[in-house]
Image: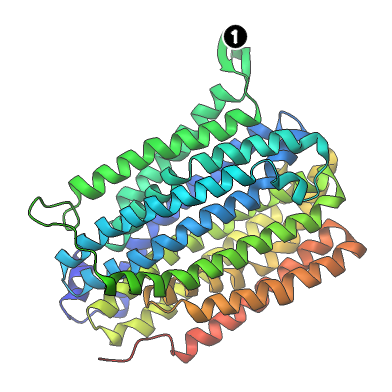
């Protein structure tokens, strides 16, 4: 990308050029995140139409599967940030070595995590206090997702490595393809063979009739297919990162230590966040199947608002990482503010639409009136927090690009465990599910505010050396 090359070469970039660069890097990731969310809507709707019990079984373990995925993501960060710095400094040989070391390390880590997930699969529903009627489906779903963790790890790691090299389009396009493939597989795996009518024509649609198990299998098979494609484009087709026969893998203690320095706070952060989501689910679970389903559907719908923020955060990590690698400290602070401001603006606009169309959005998932009523109410509560949520998402991407990961992990720990969970436990007894989401809204506003304060102070920028 020409403007990224200008950045690495130390050339001046005007404000409009920086905005265009942010837009060029962000747009593919934003479109991929939005398409992912839309496909998740369809995916969740398929399960939701099986019944509230099936929807609740998937919703129950959703936060636990996020926890496993988030730990995989933490490993990715330790290597992708270093690769961005190396590319920014035009040290491509070092970047390629980091690719090889990172993939091997990620594979070993995800295999251990998979073994843990398999061991815990039968225990998770009981630990969360769910009704015994949904234990079996929830356990099966969690087990299959756990078995697919190595594919998820390598898929995410390869995508992150391509993105930090400046190639946002290809990983984004593959992510879009994964969404369509997941829905297609689920269409055949979830439902039984049935007659389908289109206009005046009726034909038999084959189906495996696997229900919740089919949804998990569709997701895992998709991860394996997309992982294979992502690794091909990284290791064979990438201009700067593809394997060279003459370059042997070199296990550098310094690189491993740096990866650990970056990764362990991210791992702590993800553990704090995802375990808090598990606790939040446990707080909501006693409210019954309708509340569990409404909570799960609303989280999926809300992601339509915050996924663009994650797209911009990916771009911010690349930009800040390469800026620091190229020692362009003159641009680092400016780009941090510009990316965060862009994220807040986009998510504020989307929050307005979410507030207005909440009944229609929740209605896409289920015909159950109780679930629709609860889902509409909590989505409208959450809409007020979206701009602050954007600030925390994008600013975190900025800090990660700078290799500053410890302080944000502490900020998230305090925000989730000192603000959200105690407040949710207090309010849920008085206002039910709406009370839990009031607590979530208050916590997101608090988190966004402290992230903006840290961004403004600039202490996350490395010393000029």
**Nearer-the-camera pick, 415 or 134:** 134
Which residue lies at the image location 58% right of the left edge and 58% below the top edge?
A: 305
Residue at the disc numbered 1: 200
Residue 338 in the image, given as x and y percentages of width and height: 42, 77
Which of the image's four quarters has the N terminus?
bottom left
Q: Can residue 357 be seen at all in this image of the molecule?
A: no
Q: Which quadrant holds residue 279?
A: bottom right
The residue lying furthest to the right in this view is 430
Up-down relation of residue 66 to residue 118 (above or below): below
Q: Can residue 219 be seen at all in this image of the molecule?
A: yes
Which residue lies at the image location 49% right of the left edge and 79% below the top edge?
A: 406
Which of the image's four quarters has the C terminus?
bottom left
Which residue lies at the image location 52% right of the left edge and 53% below the top edge?
A: 69
Residue 102 in the image, given as x and y percentages of width and height: 32, 59
Left or right, residue 273 beside residue 366: left
How is the model colour-coded?
Answer: rainbow
Left or right, residue 278 beside residue 321: right
Residue 57 in the image, given as x and y percentages of width and height: 72, 39
Residue 99 in the image, given as x and y percentages of width and height: 26, 58
Up-down relation of residue 223 to residue 76 (above or below): above
Up-down relation of residue 233 to residue 213 (above or below): below
Which residue lies at the image location 46% right of the left edge and 63% below the top edge?
A: 74
**Nearer-the-camera pick, 206 or 331:** 206
Dot 1: element: loop
């Amino acid at each position: 990308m020409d403007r990224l090359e200008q950045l690495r070469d130390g050339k001046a970039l005007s404000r409009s050029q920086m905005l265009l660069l942010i837009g060029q890097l962000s747009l593919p990731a934003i479109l991929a995140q939005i398409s992912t969310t839309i496909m998740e809507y369809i995916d969740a709707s398929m399960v939701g139409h099986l019944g509230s019990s099936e929807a609740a079984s998937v919703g129950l373990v959703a936060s636990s599967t996020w926890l496993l995925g988030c730990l995989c993501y933490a490993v990715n960060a330790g290597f992708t940030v270093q690769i961005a710095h190396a590319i920014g400094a035009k040290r491509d040989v070092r970047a390629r070595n980091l690719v090889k070391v990172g993939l091997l390390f990620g594979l070993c880590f995800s295999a251990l995590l998979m073994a843990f997930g398999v061991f815990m699969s039968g225990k998770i529903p009981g630990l969360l206090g769910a009704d015994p009627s949904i234990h079996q489906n929830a356990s099966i779903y969690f087990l299959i997702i756990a078995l697919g963790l190595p594919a998820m790890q390598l898929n995410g790691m390869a995508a992150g490595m391509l993105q930090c090299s400046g190639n946002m389009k290809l990983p984004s396009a593959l992510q879009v393809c994964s969404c369509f493939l997941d829905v297609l597989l689920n269409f055949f795996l979830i439902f039984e063979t049935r007659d389908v009518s289109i206009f005046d024509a009726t034909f038999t649609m084959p189906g495996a009739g696997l229900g919740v198990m089919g949804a998990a299998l569709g997701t895992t098979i998709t991860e394996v297919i997309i992982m294979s494609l992502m690794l091909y484009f990284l290791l064979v087709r990438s201009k700067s990162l593809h394997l060279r026969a003459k370059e042997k893998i070199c296990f550098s203690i310094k690189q491993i230590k740096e990866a650990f320095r970056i990764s362990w706070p991210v791992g702590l952060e993800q553990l704090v966040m995802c375990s808090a989501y598990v606790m939040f689910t446990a707080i909501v679970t006693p409210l019954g199947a309708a509340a569990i389903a409404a909570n799960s559907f609303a989280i999926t719908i809300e992601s339509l608002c915050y996924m663009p923020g994650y797209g911009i955060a990916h771009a911010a990590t690349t930009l800040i990482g390469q800026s620091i690698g190229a020692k362009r400290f003159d641009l680092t602070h400016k780009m941090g503010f510009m990316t965060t401001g862009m994220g807040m603006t986009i998510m504020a606009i989307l929050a307005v639409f979410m507030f207005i169309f909440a009944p229609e959005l929740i209605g896409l998932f289920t015909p159950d009136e109780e679930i629709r009523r609860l889902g509409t109410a909590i989505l409208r509560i959450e809409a007020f927090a979206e701009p602050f949520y954007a600030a925390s998402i994008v600013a975190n991407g900025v800090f990660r690009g700078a290799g500053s990961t410890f302080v944000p992990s502490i900020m998230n720990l305090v925000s989730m465990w000192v603000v959200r969970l105690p407040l949710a436990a207090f309010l849920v007894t008085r206002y039910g599910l709406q009370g839990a989401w009031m607590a979530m809204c208050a916590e997101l506003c608090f988190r966004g505010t402290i992230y903006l304060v840290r961004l403004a102070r600039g202490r996350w920028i490395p010393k000029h050396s």
